[in-house]
């Protein structure tokens, strides 16, 4: 395994731990963070972005690092995307069934996967430029 893949593997493990902390803890523990995020979004957009817009953007942004790191580690775009679908669905189902203060939705899964797809595209394009095609798109 190359040094880049090894470093990406470690970064992916850290990211997954942080992802679990952000998505699987009760919402009330994250209220101060969301308050600051919403206030910052409103300030930057001159009040054009509301709470729902911030949540959409956050759901997309949350999975971009997963897409980048998963492609670097696995070197398979479709496998990385399939794992993103499964991971996001597992998170949302856990929120729906066992975290009454959280709201697991299909929309969140779709937005998370969109974020992962953006990350996969960024990693795929970067790796193609740097390595001249050491990456496979398919499953095998």
Image: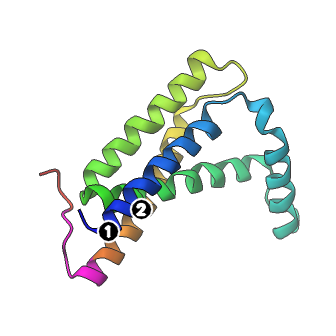
Few, some or many C-alpha atoms within 10 Å of disc 2 (few <14, some 14-19, many ≥20)?
many
Answer above or below: position of 67 versus 23.
below
**51 left or right of 103 in image:** right
- Magenta-span inclusion, residue 132: yes
Image quadrant occupied by the N terminus: bottom left
Snapshot quadrant of residue 40: bottom right
Helix or strand or loop: what does disc 2 sit on?
helix
Which percent across, then down, holds residue 82?
31, 43
| Residue assigned mark 1 | 3
**83 left or right of 138 in image:** right
Residue at x 37%, y 68% (from the top left corner): 123
Disc with the residue nearer the chain's start (2 vs 1): 1
Which percent across, then down, holds residue 72?
33, 63
Residue at x 17%, y 56% (from the top left corner): 138
**63 left or right of 4 in image:** right
Few, some or many C-alpha atoms within 10 Å of disc 1 (few <14, some 14-19, many ≥20)?
few
Residue at x 71%, y 27% (from the top left corner): 26
Count of numbered labels shown in the rendering: 2
| Residue assigned mark 2 | 68
Answer above or below: position of 54 versus 90.
below
Answer above or below: position of 1 versus 29.
below
The disc at residue 51 is none
Which percent across, then down, holds residue 32?
85, 43
Residue at x 38%, y 35% (from the top left corner): 86
Farthest residue, direction left: 140
Range of residues picked out in magenta: 128-136
Question: Is there a contact, CB below 8 Å, between mark 2 and mark 1?
Answer: no
- Magenta-span inclusion, residue 102: no
Q: How is the image coloured?
A: rainbow
Answer above or below: position of 126 versus 69.
below
Distance, label 2 to label 1, CA atoms, is 16 Å
Helix or strand or loop: what does disc 1 sit on?
helix
């Amino acid at each position: 395994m190359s040094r880049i893949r090894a470093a990406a593997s470690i970064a992916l493990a850290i990211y997954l731990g942080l992802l679990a902390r952000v998505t699987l803890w009760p919402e009330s523990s994250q209220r101060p963070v969301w308050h600051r995020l919403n206030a910052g979004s409103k300030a930057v957009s001159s009040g054009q972005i509301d709470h729902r817009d911030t949540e959409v953007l956050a759901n997309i942004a949350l999975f971009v690092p997963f897409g980048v790191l998963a492609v670097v580690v696995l070197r398979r775009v479709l496998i990385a995307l399939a794992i993103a679908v499964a991971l996001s669905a597992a998170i949302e189902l856990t929120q729906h069934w066992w975290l009454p203060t959280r709201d697991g939705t299909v929309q969140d899964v779709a937005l998370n996967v969109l974020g992962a797809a953006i990350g996969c595209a960024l990693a795929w394009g970067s790796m193609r430029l740097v390595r001249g095609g050491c990456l496979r798109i398919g499953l095998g």
